[in-house]
Image (cartoon, grey):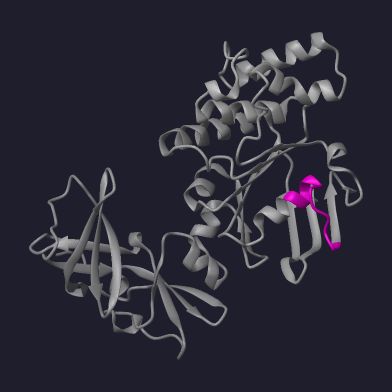
Amino acid sequence: MGYVELHDINKHFKKFHASKDINISIEKGKLVALLGPSGSGKTTILRMIAGLEQPDSGEILIDGKVVNNTPGSERGIGFVFQNYALFRYMTVYDNIAFGLRVKKIPEEEIRDRVKELLELINCEGLEKRFPSQLSGGQRQRVAFARALAPNPQILLLDEPFAAIDAKVRLELRTWLREMITKLNITSIFVTHDQDEAIEVADEIIVTNLGKVEQSGTPQELYKNPATPFVAQFIGHSVEVRNYEKFKHFNKQGENSIAYLRPEFVSIFKKGESVQFANSAEEAIVEDTIFRGSNIEIRVRIHGNLISAIRSINEPEIRVGELVDVFIYRLYIVDGENVVLATNDSITDEDVVI
């Protein structure tokens, strides 16, 4: 039995069905991501757990108790909003102390708790500053501390890194992961960024059109997508409709389509010594995109624009160059079935060229 559970939850906003028969179970102490595109229902789920929205039907349980009619303030929840929601005319100290003062905690205890949290978020010495005097990363850390101040049993975070620049966002991901592990607090965060979810979460719940498509560890979702939506949503996939034209792949259903990820493709310069060279296909490079330590190479095969990642330490490939392309595998979707298909030559061809 999970620490947080949603049973057959439905929620409408007028005629819009935002949550459709949602069933979720989250273990105590886990860091879980609600991942999906805009409008998929992930934030509605978070707000219902927080008590900010009321489900039309179904039950929400926390620690085995139904909390549908329990006010959010009595659910033992800390909430971190996307835009921080710090009180701009309060100092860092007063922002963190706010929830404790509402509960009429003695000021001496508040002082000790704020000091403890400032150390936890690595913001010692900033207690007299106002939010406008902080960086985006510091404001988000203070928002975390304010949510944690009353010792909640559950921490909810709505797109916690969305308003922060890319470099700081990467640093905060690591920090959040370490903080949650240290505190052992059950945490649920909403994100539309799959890289963020994969890097940070113990478990990912993928939502789409108000439904839960699949849940599991990041590895499980990445390697074994259970639905067509997950197959195309996870892993920067591109859709391939005439995949049977690729060498050593067979059609698996009259209306089937395939999804291809960059890591399923290798692109080589002419003359490079590579395995399965006899199974490669020729293509002209249409574009190259610098990705830091890697280069994304884009080519068009059988009408499909596909990508592969190549290290910057390998010989340079230029736009307009004739290259060899080998496709290792792809996901084939036939109706609601998803199958990982492997290039037949990987088992049939034994010669390394």
* Residue bounds of the magenta highlight: 47-57
Above or below for 231 versus 153 = below
Task: Please say whether residue 255 is visible from this viewpoint.
Answer: yes
**Residue 87 shown in magenta:** no
Q: Residue furthest bottom?
A: 254
Residue 123 rendering spot, x and y as whole percentages: 57, 18
- At 78% from the left edge and 35% from the top edge, which residue is drawn? 153
Residue 94 rendering spot, x and y as whole percentages: 71, 18
- At 28% from the left edge and 43% from the top edge, which residue is drawn? 292
Task: Please say whether residue 350 is visible from this viewpoint.
Answer: no
Numbered marks: total? 0
> In this image, 228 relative to 188: left or right?
left
Above or below for 46 versus 146 = below
Of the pair 327 and 320, the residue shown nearer to us:
320
Q: Residue furthest top?
A: 108
> In this image, 105 relative to 298: left or right?
right
**Residue 54 shown in magenta:** yes
* Residue 249, quarter of the rendered image: bottom left
